[in-house]
Amino acid sequence: MEDYVKSAWEALCRSYTSDETLIRQLWDELEKAYTAKDRHYHNLEHIAYMLELADRYKQESPQQDLLRFAIFYHDIVYKATRSDNEEQSAALAEERLHRLGIPEVDILQVKEMIIATKSHQTHKNDLINLLLDLNLAILGADQKRYDRYSQGVRKEYSIYPDLVYKPGRRKVLLHFLAQEHIYKTLEFQGAFEDKARANLQRELALYSEQKRLS
């Protein structure tokens, strides 16, 4: 999995620079961030899953590279106690993409894409909507993968006791379930919507049952 993500990174960067040292340095930074001890879900497995699905649901767009840069950098800064992870990730991406020689207008687009993952609101840009769906694809994964995701999120928020975490998590689950569509694109609505709702309902029922028994 790590080799797959690293190879994808190298292939992406080589379209813009021949500086192998820079490509390796930037990869080392990404790898360090996504393999940190506190990364139980927002890690390289998450990035790999998004890259795989980006290939499967590839749009006809000249900005596919920008989507991939956004995937790599959207969670490079991630701390459960912070409320500005997306802004910090976007700022770091801006500096690193400058070093790769990415045009300024494209860098601004990547920043906009990363910031959009904060609120996950439907966007006028189809590529941004695809990124948002890729980021939430885990909700519609098979039960085993979904459970691994939810357990990973709990570990990332381990500084909070159940008394604090569970009500917050229930609020998140209810927020998704209250939406007319969890996913923005028709492709993801068809492929993931029903399974995502089933997974969310199942986790929500678990918290309700635990509350009843306590």
Image (tube, grey):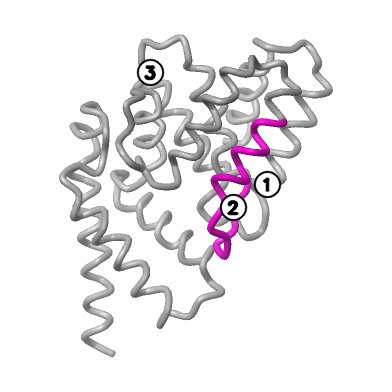
Q: Which residues are magenta?
A: 77-95
In the rendered image, residue 95, in percent from the top left (x then y), is placed at 71, 31
Is 87 magenta? The answer is yes
The earlier-in-sequence mark between 2 and 1 is 1
From the image, which quarter does the C terminus lie in? Answer: bottom left
From the image, which quarter does the N terminus lie in? Answer: top right
- Residue at 27%, 64% (x, y): give it: 203
Mark 3 residue element = loop
Mark-to-mark CA distance, 1 and 3: 27 Å
Query: Label 3, on which residue?
Result: 58
Query: Label 1, on which residue?
Result: 33
Front in this rendered view, residue 33 or 142:
33
Looking at the rendered structure, the kind of residue marked 1 is Ala
> Is 154 situated above or below 199?
below
Kindly indicate whether the residue at mark 1 contacts the one at mark 2 (C-beta within 8 angstroms): yes
Q: Residue furthest right?
A: 21
Looking at the rendered structure, the kind of residue marked 2 is Tyr
Front in this rendered view, residue 77 or 137:
77
Mark 2 residue element = loop
Q: Residues within 10 Å of mark 1 (few under 14, many from 20)?
A: many
- Residue at 38%, 37% (x, y): give it: 132
The earlier-in-sequence mark between 3 and 2 is 3
- Residue at 21%, 34% (x, y): give it: 189
Q: Residue furthest bottom?
A: 214
Please identify, in this view, whether the residue under mark 3 or under mark 2 is nearer the observer.
2
In the rendered image, residue 179, in percent from the top left (x then y), is placed at 20, 49
Mark-to-mark CA distance, 3 and 2: 27 Å
Find residue 74 and report its image quarter: top right
Mark-to-mark CA distance, 2 and 1: 8 Å
- Label at residue 140: none
